[in-house]
Amino acid sequence: MMNGLIANHLHILCRALWHHITGRRFPLSLTWLLTYRCNLRCRYCEIWKNEDEEELPAEEGFSVIDQGFSLGLRRIGF
């Protein structure tokens, strides 16, 4: 487990160095709200006001994930 964590941190460090040298930007992390349907009404979040918005179809979502990983994405939070 620890070797995997160290490898992940080294990979991120190398990508950051590559960005510094080349100026090329790339995603490291993606946070994705899968739905606007929420039964909570938190003071700091108004996502529930978008309930009428159309959600991304699954196939398009998979495509976004694949594109992210091809660009160097390392982590996704749902």
Image (tube, rainbow, N blue to C red):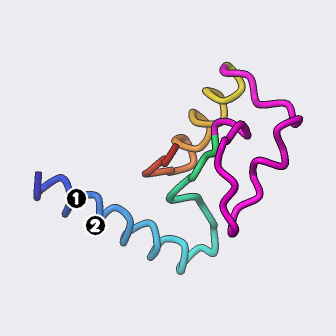
Question: Which portion, as a residue range, is magenta?
Answer: 34-58
Task: Look at the numbered disc 2 and give the secondary structure of its residue.
Answer: helix
Is residue 51 inside the magenta stretch?
yes
Q: Residue at x 11, y 56 (%)?
A: 3
Three-letter amino acid code of the residue under disc 1: Ala
Whether residue 15 is situated above or below residue 38 in the rendered picture: below
> Which label was assigned to residue 39?
none
Asked if the residue at tag 2 contacts the one at tag 1, i.e. Cβ–Cβ closer than 8 Å, the answer is yes
> Which label was assigned to residue 10?
2
Please rate how many residues cluster around mark 2, counting C-alpha atoms within 10 Å: few if below 14, some from 14 to 19, many from 20: few
Q: Residue at x 74, y 22 (%)?
A: 57
Q: Position of residue 72 (x, y in %)?
A: 50, 51
Which residue occupies the extreme bottom position in the image? 20
Q: Residue at x 50, y 50 (%)?
A: 73
Most frequent secondary structure within the magenta stretch: loop
Q: CA distance from mark 1 to mark 2?
A: 5 Å
Task: Look at the numbered disc 1 and give the secondary structure of its residue.
Answer: helix
Q: Residue at x 73, y 40 (%)?
A: 36
Three-letter amino acid code of the residue under disc 2: Leu
Tell whether 60 sits left or right of 76: right
Please rate how many residues cluster around mark 1, counting C-alpha atoms within 10 Å: few if below 14, some from 14 to 19, many from 20: few
Q: Position of residue 12 (x, y in %)?
A: 38, 65
Residue linked to disc 1 = 7
Which residue occupies the extreme right position in the image? 52
